[in-house]
Amino acid sequence: MDIPEPRYAKTVDGVSIAYQVVGEGDLDLVFVNSPYLSDLELGWEWPFVSSLLRGLASRGRLIWFDRRGAGLSDAVSGERLPTIEARIDDLRAVMDAVGSERPILVAMEDGAAQCFLFAATYPERTRALVTFNATVRGLWAPDAPWAWTEEQWTKEIDGIERGWGTPAYVQNLVSWIFPTRSDDTEFVRVYGRLLRHALGRADAVAANRMWRDTDVRHVLPLIQAPTLAVDHAHIASVETEESRYVAARIPGASFAELERPDLDWAEFFAHFDRFIASLREEEAEFERMLATVLFTDIVGSTERIAEMGDRAWHQLVEDHHAIVRAMIGRYRGSEVDTAGDGFFATFDGPARAAKCARAIIEGVKPLGIEIRAGVHTGEVETIAGKIGGMAVVIGSRVGAMAQASEVLASQTVKDLTAGSGLVFEDAGEHELKGVPDRWHLYRVLQ
């Protein structure tokens, strides 16, 4: 996998945010990392981070960035720290720069707080949320018992100011956050190098002060996006209780706890892939809707072409198309496709579709041609941006059964248009090619 050079997005307050785009596919995955691991270049050199990045990039278009104050992005002022609202603009600026309209947000630790606020503020731009050891509040409170006290934060910040990036500091940090790797000297060495490049001492102090002052608990019930909250039992940066709290407060969220100590992300991606599969199934359900489909085509077109010649036929077809489109618009239908001399349109009401078909038949008679039409109401779905599904197949087959100047409709259309003034004549039962069972059809007379 080729690692691209970093690019930069500019926020509304003038901050430059470094980002990368890796991979491709129909999933946009925006990764909001922990500032402790945030360096677009060295992140690829530490297996713990790079295996996560590569796993995400193999599943879609991965967009990740260095948060303000970390890695290659602009620093923040220790005197005037940016609000979390300003920090969610970092996320929006990167999304806009790469043309990502509605990605899945993947967030680690306090990066999740940014994503929660973003998802609540911009639900139309959030497809889903996946969090890893998410945190929503930094400072202890009676209803946030997992968080650190003021004394614990003071001790942590003092320790950063005295020893940030030193071998002893890095070893202590690994022993706390990654206890199963505390004896792995190479793991500790590479982590320390990434840590020093991700944050300078003042930046690390600022990052901890921002984490300490964060509280987005109030937005959790407002999040509409499907959410998976994952916690790793062997990474101690965030208490499992907080991840459970997140999952319990976001409507419909799922919770998964990882138990394997190897930190190779395989267990995480097993949960991630199941979540994405369920998301796709859910979205496929949302793309289904009840609609009435109308199919028309000119009867005897092959013979007419032979009689008239190509040039005259082409003009006739243009005149036919103009009439059909006018009628579809008049009856508030939507043209879906045109193939040769045939039309496929959808309507949100079966009576309008049937009346449109009759109007087209009368409208094209002065051209010296006849059409046939089929109407059916059923559940359609959007497939790769196009209308499809069994209802479309049935409508097409019903249209193919019609004779010249005839509109055939399914039993469903007849039942749904009771009281509309339409007159139907029984056309008997028929087998429709490729469609199970026999279908009762009716002629629409007027």
Image: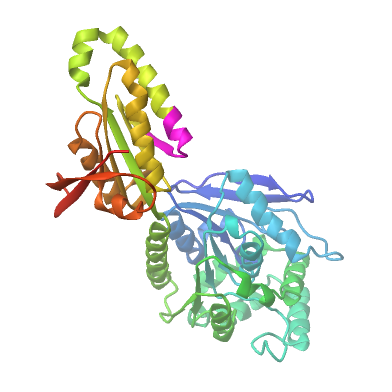
> Quadrant where the C terminus lies?
top left
Question: Does 240 sit left or right of 445 as displayed?
Answer: right
The answer to whether 162 appears left or right of 132 in the picture is: right
Residue drawn where x is 73% and y is 50% of the image: 11
Q: Nearer the viewer, residue 13 or 424?
A: 424
Give coordinates of residue 247: x percent, y percent.
53, 78
Residue 295 lies left or right of residue 441; in this view the side is: right
Residue at the limit of the structure toward the bottom, as seen here = 142
Please give the count of numbered marks on the rendered protein: 0
Along the viewing direction, whichever of 263 and 228 lies nearer the viewer: 228
Please determine whether, in this image, residue 236 is positioned above or below residue 216: below
Q: Residue at x 54, y 84 (%)?
A: 240
Can you say whether 337 is above or below 44 in the image?
Answer: above
Compare residues 75 and 368 and report the one nearer the observer.
368
Residue 328: percent from left, percent from top:
42, 34
Residue 334 colored in magenta in the image: yes
Does residue 195 appear in this view?
no
Residue at 70% from the left image edge and 79% from the top image edge: 138
Q: In the rendered image, is residue 44 in sight?
A: yes
Q: Is residue 26 left or right of residue 6?
A: left
Say which quarter of the image contains residue 392: top left
Q: Position of residue 274 (x, y in %)?
A: 37, 68
User: Colour scheme in the image?
Assistant: rainbow
* Residue extent of the magenta highlight: 326-337
Q: Nearer the viewer, residue 293 or 197?
A: 293
The residue shown at (13%, 47%) is: 430
Residue 57 position in % (x across, y down)? 45, 54
Residue furthest right as drawn: 79
Residue 22 on the magenta segment: no
